[in-house]
Image (cartoon, helix red, strand yellow):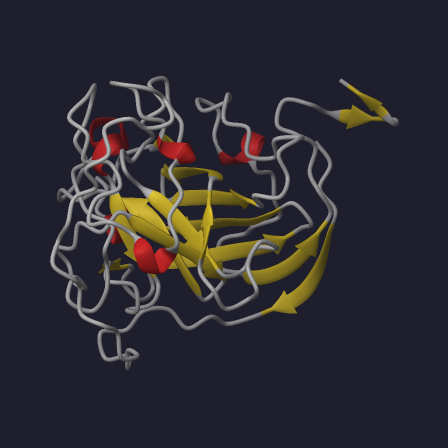
């Protein structure tokens, strides 16, 4: 798989601090459950990735349905009243190299394989009503923006997102075998995609991520591109180097504009796809 990037230079990013000044955020509204029973997948099998909400119109829980693995563990209305080390916010923000979140364990020393349905958001900034990634936990990052997606590949201390230090991790996405997603009810928003105006948080319907083994990668695909699928998630046992190849190095922080990678599982050599 070929990856061509134009490095914009090395940057030092300011991550979360308990003393950081947060903007004024409207308190959380009284929790209200979405009462819909017939969702896109039909009775008993709601399809998480088809549920669409404006960020300002999120229900308390996107997936309150008591079917299959449901209902949802956490909640989606997240702001200053839900911020803190015990937050079970399952709304993840993926804006830029100094303002993004990762899925992590709600349980101390959790393992992705055991908590994948209930992982919660850990963020670099105290603005999103989530748990915080401790300063210094992220030790390297390459943030790449292309015409089809934005991608982050980096290095992180497992304990910074609640994982057991020895957990090698796993893959998460909004699909899954039962189409309920992992995390179940987890939604992603960004103001850094081509579908956003650069300010408004816009829902990302197609994304995937690997986290664990003291590393992470996260790709958010633009809604305007349905084919090819740059967020293909069939190869979830292989990891970041196969699914999101990059030039990320521990100890370095870079922000890049990049060419599109081949779709995962397709390789180009000598102008021929394989």
Q: Give whichever of 80, 141 is nearer the camera.
A: 80
- Image point (28%, 54%), residue name: 122
Residue 258 located left or right of residue 199: right
Residue 244 located left or right of residue 210: right
Q: Give whichever of 193, 240 is nearer the camera.
A: 193
Q: Which x, y percent locates residue 89?
A: 22, 51
Q: Which x, y percent locates residue 155?
A: 43, 50
Residue 111 visible in the picture: no
Q: Which x, y percent locates residue 142?
A: 55, 55
Q: Give whichever of 114, 24 is nearer the camera.
A: 24
Residue 81 visible in the picture: yes
Total count of labels: 0
For the N terminus, the quadrant is: top right
- Image point (32%, 45%), residue name: 103
Q: Image quadrant of residue 181? A: top left
Residue 144, compared with residue 165, is above or below; it is below
Q: Image quadrant of residue 173? A: top left
Residue 177 located left or right of residue 257: left
For the C terminus, the quadrant is: top right
Q: Which x, y percent locates residue 49?
A: 41, 34
Residue 115, compared with residue 138, is above or below; it is above
Q: Image quadrant of residue 104? A: top left
Residue 113 located left or right of residue 229: left
Residue 262, compared with residue 96, is above or below; it is above
- Image point (21%, 47%), residue name: 162
């Amino acid at each position: 798989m070929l990856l061509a990037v134009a490095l914009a230079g090395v940057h030092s990013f300011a991550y979360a601090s308990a003393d950081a000044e947060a903007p004024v955020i409207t308190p959380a509204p009284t929790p209200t459950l979405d009462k819909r029973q017939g969702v896109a997948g039909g009775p008993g099998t709601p399809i998480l990735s088809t549920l669409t909400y404006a960020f300002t119109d999120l229900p308390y829980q996107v997936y309150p349905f008591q079917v299959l693995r449901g209902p949802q563990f956490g909640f989606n209305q997240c702001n200053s009243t839900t911020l803190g080390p015990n937050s079970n916010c399952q709304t993840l923000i993926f804006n830029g190299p100094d303002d993004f979140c990762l899925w992590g364990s709600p349980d101390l020393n959790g393992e992705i394989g055991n908590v994948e349905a209930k992982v919660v958001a850990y963020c670099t900034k105290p603005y999103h009503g989530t748990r915080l990634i401790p300063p210094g936990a992220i030790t390297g990052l390459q943030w790449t923006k292309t015409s089809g997606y934005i991608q982050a590949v980096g290095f992180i201390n497992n304990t910074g997102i609640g994982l057991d230090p020895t957990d090698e991790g796993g893959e998460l996405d909004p699909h899954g075998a039962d189409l309920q997603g992992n995390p179940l009810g987890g939604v992603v928003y960004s103001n850094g995609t081509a579908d956003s105006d650069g300010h408004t948080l816009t829902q990302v319907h197609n994304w995937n991520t690997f986290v664990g083994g003291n590393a992470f990668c996260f790709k958010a695909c633009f809604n305007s591109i349905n084919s090819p699928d740059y967020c293909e998630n069939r190869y979830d046992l292989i990891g970041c180097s196969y699914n999101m190849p990059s030039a990320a190095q521990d100890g370095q922080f870079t922000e890049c504009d990049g060419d599109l990678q081949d779709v995962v599982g397709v390789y180009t050599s000598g102008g021929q796809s394989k």
